[in-house]
């Protein structure tokens, strides 16, 4: 394992070097290579896809952001996963990589999954090649004044402490857990109190030092029991599913979540999957299946009840935002401070990229 920590230290020191600002727009990395050497091949394919799937996803997120901020100007939008969306590949000259500035202006931050630990498997250190690549996007995000959050998945206290240490070096906002996805259903116990716990009210992402991310909250009991349990913590940000069991969180529950145990305010965000849909989602209708309606595509690898969706299709986008029946309207009406958009890796499905090819 010594090689891993040596590599980490080297990459962290390199990441902190101040490269010329125009290096970002020219697509230069710390090794003099284009930021997206791998993604160029992904995006182009043999004959080129009919749609620019990454750009379609960026545009979708931009529209979500514009709608949400029309309801609440201070609404927070965080993009979870696929940090490569921060850069654009020219559809004519695939060697030309530039910063996706319009997209960057539409979001408040990014959330990186498995930055140092657990990218693929809980407790497994992220490969140095993958880490180096992701740190380029981390630096690009910070250069553009985006908040950078990350989630690490570790097996013990030692790994948790290492992860928190790395976050301090890079001044990132961490969450470290021993479970992933829907199994994120409890408060981690690696630390007795949240990392860099503070008594200040959190009025924007800039103020946040830590966060709590929960997938399924039904294990906490009734909504009021859940809200009071989380209220009894001092996390700066709490990210939860809009649904608690079969019912959406009430406005009263969300309001309770907005206050730390110390009495100061914090941000409450909802995480929403914009790249796939499951048969248990509230909007799912009887008779829906792959190909019916046409924008429902094949099942995800780990869950046959969850299907990729053609996220550029108007009918799907109408479910997510646009009117009083949409997901985003519901979030603003219930009092959420913002949203974490998940499922961004779905564009790779439509490009035919399998997991093993993306390691």
Image: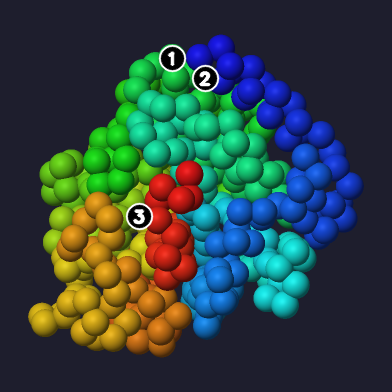
Image vertical order of residue 342 relative to residue 93, above or below: above
In the picture, measured across the screen, residue 218 lies left or right of residue 294, that is left
Residue 182 visible from this viewpoint: yes
Furthest residue in direction left, as rendered: 286
The residue sitting at 38% across, 77% down in the picture is: 310
| x then y, percent, for residue 346 | 41, 64
Judged from the image, the secondary structure of the residue bearing numbered disc 2 is helix
The residue sitting at 35% across, 31% down in the picture is: 122
Residue 8: image quadrant is: top right
Taking depth in this image into account, of 353 and 246 the one nearest to the observer is 353
Q: Residues within 10 Å of mark 1 (few under 14, many from 20)?
A: few
Q: Residues within 10 Å of mark 3 (few under 14, many from 20)?
A: some
In the picture, measured across the screen, residue 14 lies left or right of residue 104, that is right
In the picture, measured across the screen, residue 171 lies left or right of residue 180, that is right
Q: Are marks 2 and 1 in contact (CB under 8 Å)?
A: yes
Q: Tell me the residue that label 1 is attached to.
A: 158
């Amino acid at each position: 394992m010594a090689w891993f920590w040596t590599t980490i230290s080297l990459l962290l020191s390199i990441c902190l070097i101040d490269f010329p600002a125009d290096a970002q727009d020219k697509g230069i990395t710390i090794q003099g290579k284009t930021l997206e050497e791998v993604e160029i091949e992904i995006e182009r394919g043999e004959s080129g896809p009919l749609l620019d799937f990454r750009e379609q996803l960026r545009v979708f997120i931009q529209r979500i952001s514009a709608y949400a901020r029309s309801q609440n100007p201070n609404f927070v939008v965080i993009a979870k996963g696929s940090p490569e969306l921060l850069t654009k590949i020219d559809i004519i000259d695939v060697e030309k990589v530039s910063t996706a500035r319009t997209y960057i202006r539409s979001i408040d931050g990014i959330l990186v999954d498995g930055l140092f630990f657990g990218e693929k498997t809980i407790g497994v250190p992220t490969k140095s090649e993958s880490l180096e690549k992701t740190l380029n996007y981390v630096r690009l995000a910070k250069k553009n004044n985006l908040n950078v959050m990350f989630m690490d998945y570790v097996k013990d206290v030692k790994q948790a402490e290492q992860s928190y240490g790395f976050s301090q070096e890079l001044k990132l906002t961490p969450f470290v857990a021993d479970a992933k996805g829907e199994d994120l259903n409890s408060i981690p116990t690696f630390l007795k109190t949240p990392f860099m716990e503070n008594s200040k009210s959190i009025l924007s992402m800039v103020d946040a030092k830590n966060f709590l991310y929960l997938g399924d909250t039904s294990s906490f009991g009734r909504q009021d029991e859940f809200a009071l349990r989380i209220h009894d913590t001092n996390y700066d940000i709490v990210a939860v599913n809009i649904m608690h069991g079969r019912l959406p969180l009430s406005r009263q529950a969300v309001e309770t979540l907005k206050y730390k145990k110390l009495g100061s305010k914090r941000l409450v965000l909802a995480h929403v999957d914009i790249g796939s849909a499951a048969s248990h989602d509230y909007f799912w209708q009887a008779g829906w299946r792959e190909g019916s309606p046409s924008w429902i595509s094949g099942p995800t690898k780990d869950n046959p009840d969850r299907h990729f969706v053609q996220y550029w299709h108007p009918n799907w986008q109408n479910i997510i935002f646009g009117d009083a029946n949409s997901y985003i309207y519901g979030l603003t009406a219930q009092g959420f401070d913002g949203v974490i958009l998940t499922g961004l890796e779905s564009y790779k499905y439509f490009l035919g990229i399998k997991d093993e090819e993306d390691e």
